[in-house]
Image (tube, rainbow, N blue to C red):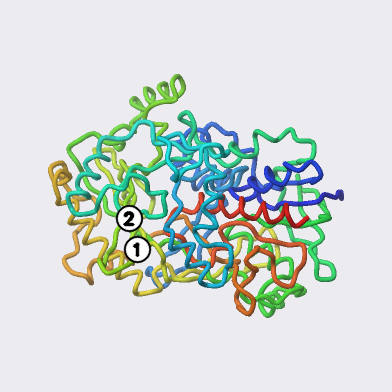
């Protein structure tokens, strides 16, 4: 089968849904959105607490394995990427976070004109429908519902008060360009349910006659003819289909998958493509490089007050489920992360270098590495380096589109990242001994035993350090003359006309934040450029 459209969008995630909704606002534009997963309307997706069951579930998550990583004792991991309309916004922890002003000013200083904080701030506002107290930092008329959490767990106030007592102040609005301090999060939720990008942007416009959404669409490659992207080859229900694009192909498959699709299409490091028998249309050595991820580590404590951990037994879950089903209230409406903090491990730093998340539940691991939820009252801190220096890459394992790409990352490859996590562990352990949190902490679950020097803490980081689920950078933008820049600052693929990448892979440097809101902002910005250029 072969059909034609103006724009074909590959990937119905946080960026693809935004582009589909915005570009189809113009009735003269015919838009086709392709998504390999399903509709994303499942019960577990809509229920905020469903995150724990969705990540790692092969119906909703690509479940991408990594190579053994020598920087973390040759451990392998499984990285998550959403596989449904809404993409990772359908399975994530729903934290709404933008990052620091300086994150975006840094992009502009690297040569990405038009991406400084003042330039991108209006697109955060355009996307957002904020349900908290009115403030100039938030939008109130956008599609994406952002809300204070409905039923915060009591442990959160103990944590906030301890951070304040330790000298890390309360931040009344961490979305105003400065995240420094401690705060309760805002969540991408509406009326006690998850507000994925599919629900926010796509569902209200699905009946537009110029918009077609195809789920179960597995993209093999982008067609390139005479230096121009002309369409997409894919499979739906096992049968081949071709969609030709009169104007542009927009690649929104995410940090791990977008570079793989480019490489299968003959766009990427020439020698690597030749090794897989792929004809080279554009020799771009930066495709798949600059893989960045928030390297993280955690602490877990037992406490003397009720927490979510003690509410997860089958009998109590029945009560919580009824509360959710009848009133959209209670435990099952709350995201896993409820309190966050951004702080400096060195007072001389201009910006916070550690981002911390408090979960009112603790998770340990058995000898096989399986996650085990602690049933006793407990909580955990997970925290990551805000702007990690460690890097990795994405490569093709095979030219076969059904073969998952190689994720070869050095999660703790930069010693400076490890040093920051060690200092942060000591700071957070000290906060756990600060009142009022100290009054309720009754023991330590992790680390066990407690390290007694920096070498011991570093060993703990390398043995137990993990990911933040915020991978970026593998198709990064940059200025003319930058040999590793895959895209120009308007996200056009260098050397190939009619092709852009729009997702978290375009970020030249990580943001000091969860990546969902910044990805939506990127797509809002791109949609305006794309629409104006036609």
Judge whether 492 appears above or below 200 on screen: below
Which residue is most to the top?
A: 326
| Of callouts 2 and 1, the N-terminal one | 2
**Residue 52 drawn above or below residue 46:** below
Label 1, secondary structure: give it.
loop
Give the alpha-carbon distance from disc 2 to disc 1, as whole Å: 8 Å
**Residue 126 visible in the current orientation:** yes
Residue visible at 61% across and 48% down in the picture? 13
- Percent position of residue 362, x then y: 30, 45
Tell me the crowding category of disc 1: few under 14, some 14 to 19, or many 20 or more residues within 10 angstroms, Cα based: many
Residue carrying label 1 = 351
Q: Name the residue: 46% across, 41% down.
A: 51
Where is residue 411 drawn, in percent x and y? 42, 67
Give whichever of 346, 54 is nearer the camera: 346
Taking depth in this image into account, of 172 and 356 the one nearest to the observer is 172
Where's residue 81, x and y in %? 55, 52
Residue 287 is left or right of residue 2, and the answer is left
Where on the picture, by quarter, is residue 42? Answer: top right
Q: Marks 2 and 1: CB-CB under 8 Å? A: yes
The numbered disc on residue 180 is 2
Q: Position of residue 33 (x, y in %)?
A: 72, 46
Q: Nearer the viewer, residue 202 or 441?
A: 202
Q: Where is residue 429, by image quadrant?
A: bottom left
Q: Tell me if 187 is positioned left or right of 3 in this view.
A: left
Residue found 70% across the figure and 44% down from its top? 216
Q: Which disc, if any, is residue 33? A: none
Residue 366 visible, this orientation:
no
Q: Give the left or right position of residue 73, taking residue 299 as reference.
A: right
């Amino acid at each position: 089968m072969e059909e034609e459209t103006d724009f074909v969008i590959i990937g119905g995630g946080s960026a693809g849904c935004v582009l589909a909704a915005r570009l189809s606002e113009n009735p003269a534009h015919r838009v086709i959105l392709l998504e390999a997963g399903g509709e994303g309307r499942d019960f577990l997706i809509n229920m905020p607490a469903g995150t724990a069951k969705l990540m790692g579930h092969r119906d909703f998550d690509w479940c991408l394995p990594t190579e053994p990583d020598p920087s973390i004792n040759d451990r392998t991991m499984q990285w998550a990427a959403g596989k449904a309309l809404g993409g990772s916004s359908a399975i994530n922890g729903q934290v709404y976070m933008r990052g620091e002003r300086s994150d975006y000013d840094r992009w502009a200083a690297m040569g990405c004109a038009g991406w400084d904080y003042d330039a991108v701030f209006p697109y955060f506002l355009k996307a957002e429908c904020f349900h908290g107290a009115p403030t100039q930092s938030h939008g109130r008329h956008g599609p994406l519902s952002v809300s204070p959490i409905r039923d915060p767990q009591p442990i959160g106030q103990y944590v906030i008060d301890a951070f304040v007592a330790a000298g890390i102040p309360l931040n009344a609005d961490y979305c105003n360009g400065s995240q420094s301090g401690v705060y309760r999060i805002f969540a991408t939720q509406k009326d006690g349910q998850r507000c994925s990008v599919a629900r926010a942007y796509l569902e209200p416009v699905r009946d537009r006659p110029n918009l077609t959404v195809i789920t179960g669409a597995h993209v093999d490659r982008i067609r390139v003819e005479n230096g121009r992207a002309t369409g997409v080859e894919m499979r739906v229900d096992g049968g081949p289909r071709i969609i030709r694009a009169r104007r542009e192909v927009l690649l929104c498959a995410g940090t791990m998958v977008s570079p793989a699709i480019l490489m299968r299409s003959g766009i990427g490091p020439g020698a690597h493509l030749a090794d897989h028998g792929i004809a080279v249309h554009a020799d771009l050595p930066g495709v798949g490089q600059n893989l960045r991820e928030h390297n993280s580590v955690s602490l877990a404590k037992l406490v003397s007050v009720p927490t979510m951990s003690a509410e997860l037994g089958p009998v109590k879950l029945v009560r919580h489920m009824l509360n959710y089903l009848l009133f959209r209230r209670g435990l099952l409406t709350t995201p896993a992360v409820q309190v966050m903090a951004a702080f400096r491990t060195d007072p001389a730093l201009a910006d916070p270098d550690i981002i911390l998340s408090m979960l009112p539940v603790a998770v340990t691991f058995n000898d096989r590495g399986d996650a085990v939820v602690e049933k006793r009252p407990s909580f955990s801190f997970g925290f990551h380096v805000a702007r990690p220096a460690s890097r990795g890459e994405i490569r093709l394992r095979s030219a076969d589109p059904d073969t998952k790409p190689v994720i070869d990352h050095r999660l703790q490859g930069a010693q400076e990242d490890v040093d920051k996590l060690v200092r942060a562990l000591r700071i957070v352990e000290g906060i756990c001994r600060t009142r009022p949190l100290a009054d309720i902490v009754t023991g330590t679950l992790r680390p066990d035993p407690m390290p007694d020097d920096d070498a011991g803490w570093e060993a703990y980081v390398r043995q137990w350090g993990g990911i933040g689920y915020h991978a970026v950078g593998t198709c990064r933008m940059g200025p003319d003359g930058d040999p590793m820049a895959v895209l120009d600052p308007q996200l056009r693929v260098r050397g190939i006309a009619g092709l852009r990448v729009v997702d978290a892979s375009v970020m030249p440097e990580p943001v000091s934040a969860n990546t969902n809101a910044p990805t939506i902002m990127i797509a809002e910005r791109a949609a305006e450029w794309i629409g104006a250029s036609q």
